[in-house]
Image (cartoon, grey):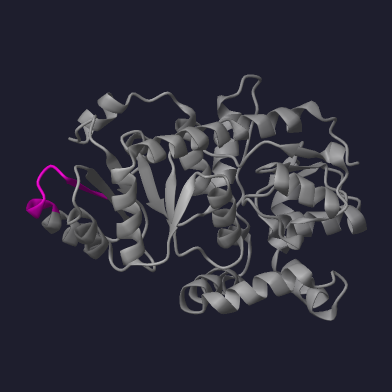
Amino acid sequence: MRAAEAIRAAANAAPGGIEATHLDVMDYVPSAFRKMYTEFYLKLVNKAPALWGYLYQASNDARPDSTMQQLRRGLERLNTRALMSAIEEAQPDAIVCTHFLPAEILARAIRKRGFTTPVWVQVTDFDLHRMWVHENMAGYFAGNEEVAYRMRRCGIAPERIHVTGIPIMPAFGQALDRAECAREFGLAPSTTTFLLMGGGAGLGSLDTVAERLLALEGTFQLIVLAGKNAKALAALKVLATRFPGRLLAQGFTDQVERLMACADLVITKPGGLTSSECLAMGLPMIVNSPIPGQEERNADYLLEQGVALKAVDGPTLEYRIAHLLAHPDQLAAMGQRARALGRAHAAADVLDHVLARPASTP
């Protein structure tokens, strides 16, 4: 959804009167299917991540013509008829899919029903699962050269593959002044600052993680994003009174890029969009609790590129932070590598390719 919103935002900002609409597939399916597709997935990755990892790999290795795959696709078609109706009513000149489900549905429509609108596919991780790959797509957008290589190995024509990066909101490509942003949030601009994002899954509750980090030796500030977790935010605000001037507890905000501009490193799960936002901002990462499958592959890429370290538990996170505080040159080097990898204008690059192509299905 965030990648789709980024492309829509880039379209709205582009000259030439482009009209972009974001259709969320889950708004056009029956509630039972939505519950199975979203809630079941969330429960699985939280309660049985190893099982999700197995299913991720098994579905990647499965033959497209296997009975199970045919049954899955049939179930999806039955439950996405309203989506096809919405698309046909909109009569778009081009479609960009940021999830494999609509790409799969539209690939069949092209093959079986003569659907002629060009369909493009934006892969949103630094990995390629086989379910992203379909015939008759107008083109593919890859997060990096390795994903592009894997696309070619899957039989996608090289001329249809474009390495654009993963689309992120334009705000993450702005040149933000650290001192100005720090003053907005009551932070010291020149002090080393760490940003802890998300629920701290695998590391304990956010306030517990924050307290353990603030007990470390060294001079640094900590920003913690609690999102919509009111209980965590309340606990963090109590903790902030014990560490005046060192902890900023923040709830849900649309100013993430301004908080990132204050930071030297982000502690986060390695989702494709969050990782891309960090890279665009030149921020190295400590990644924790990657979901088996796509997030593990993202973590591997970030570690291989030297822009991230991994923390498997609380003590490891403490060690990583203490190490970087003692070796600021390493932290700075990681930041430089992150900025070199960042593709802040991926969404605009995607649009450039889509708009340059004649409106006909290959």
Name the residue nearer the viewer: 26 or 263: 263
Asked if residue 328 is positioned above or below residue 100 in the image, the reply reads above
Q: Quadrant of residue 320?
A: bottom left
Name the residue nearer the viewer: 275 or 341: 341
Q: Quadrant of residue 111?
A: bottom right
The C terminus is located in which quarter?
A: top right
Residue positioned most to the top: 15
- At a point 86% along the width and 37% down the height, the residue shown is 159
- At a point 45% along the width and 32% down the height, the residue shown is 171
Q: Is residue 318 visible?
A: yes
Q: Taking 235 as reference, is 279 left or right? A: right
Residue 248 on the magenta span: yes
Residue 93 on the magenta span: no
Q: Taking 85 as reference, is 320 left or right? A: left
Q: Where residue 248 sits: x, y (%)? A: 21, 46
- At a point 63% along the width and 50% down the height, the residue shown is 126
Asked if residue 206 is positioned above or below residue 348 in the image, the reply reads below
Q: Quadrant of residue 38?
A: bottom right
Name the residue nearer the viewer: 116 or 51: 51
Q: Is residue 228 visible?
A: no
Instruction: Give, as a single range, the part of the protein colored magenta.
Output: 240-250
Name the residue nearer the viewer: 330 or 233: 330
